[in-house]
Amino acid sequence: MIKENLNIIREQVQAPARLIAVSKTKPVEMLQEAYDCGQRLFGENKALEMRDKHEALPKDIEWHFIGHLQSNKVKYIAPFVSLIHSIDSLAILQEVNKHAVKNNRVIDCLLQFHVASEETKFGLDMQEADELLSSAAFAELKNVRIVGVMGMATNTPDKDLVRREFHRLKEIFDDLKLRYFAGSDCFKEISMGMSGDFAIAQEEGSTLVRVGSSIFGARDYGVKVND
């Protein structure tokens, strides 16, 4: 099933977008099956679960942390995480930087923006992003690198609304690129699009699509979070 599902999704994910297989709650055996089919990018939203899977699986996997990251959990993923999608405050960025220093790494991060019409606890607005990026405290962080943005569209069958929200995230990316990262070739990632809307996300400029249930089947819990 996983091989067939992966092949179907891969046919739909077009460059420059890359596919992140969202494997949260799924057993290591299922991730290994996807790995054996050539998948190397995996997304998790729990730090301890990601740490344990990293220890059990091949070390050439590129691990993406896509959930809300608690400060006290950063230490578990800092030694190996490839990209943290969900930076929504200066405080968490400072914590990531602290543990990146301890591990002699520079950790790539995305700024998470709230672009959906539904209420959510997480995600920056433009004023908050400007305050963060223009602050002296941010300028002092040498072991984190902002490489793009992330956002989730509203969970709705209204495709026009979803498109507008993804379009807004692309506008945010372009604005930040112009004003803060014009000289950075690394600022190039737009993480948007999930199992039900990644086709629209690609049309609006996504470079990273996060697909879980369409690959691994329904998750083991009923709450829709960052997949």
Image (cartoon, rainbow, N blue to C red):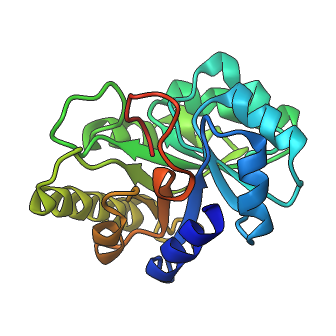
Q: Is residue 184 visible?
A: no
Q: Quadrant of residue 168?
A: bottom left
Residue 182 image offset from top left, x and y in percent? 46, 70
Number of numbered labels in the structure image: 0
- Residue at 68 percent of width and 29 percent of height: 47
Residue 44 image offset from top left, x and y in percent? 62, 41
Quarter of the picture containing the N terminus is bottom right
Determine whether, in the image, residue 226 is placed left or right of residue 115: right
In the image shown, does 207 or 103 lie closer to the viewer? 207
- Residue at 15 percent of width and 40 percent of height: 117
In the image shown, does 216 or 116 lie closer to the viewer? 216
Instruction: Note whether 155 is above or below 118 in the view shown.
Output: below
- Residue at 73 percent of width and 44 percent of height: 143
- Residue at 50 percent of width and 75 percent of height: 8
In the image shown, does 152 or 12 lie closer to the viewer? 12
Instruction: Note whether 12 is above or below 69 in the view shown.
Output: below
Q: Is residue 4 visible?
A: yes
Residue 38 image offset from top left, x and y in percent? 74, 72
Determine whether, in the image, residue 177 is placed left or right of residue 145: left
Determine whether, in the image, residue 203 is placed left or right of residue 220: left
Residue 40 image offset from top left, x and y in percent? 73, 64
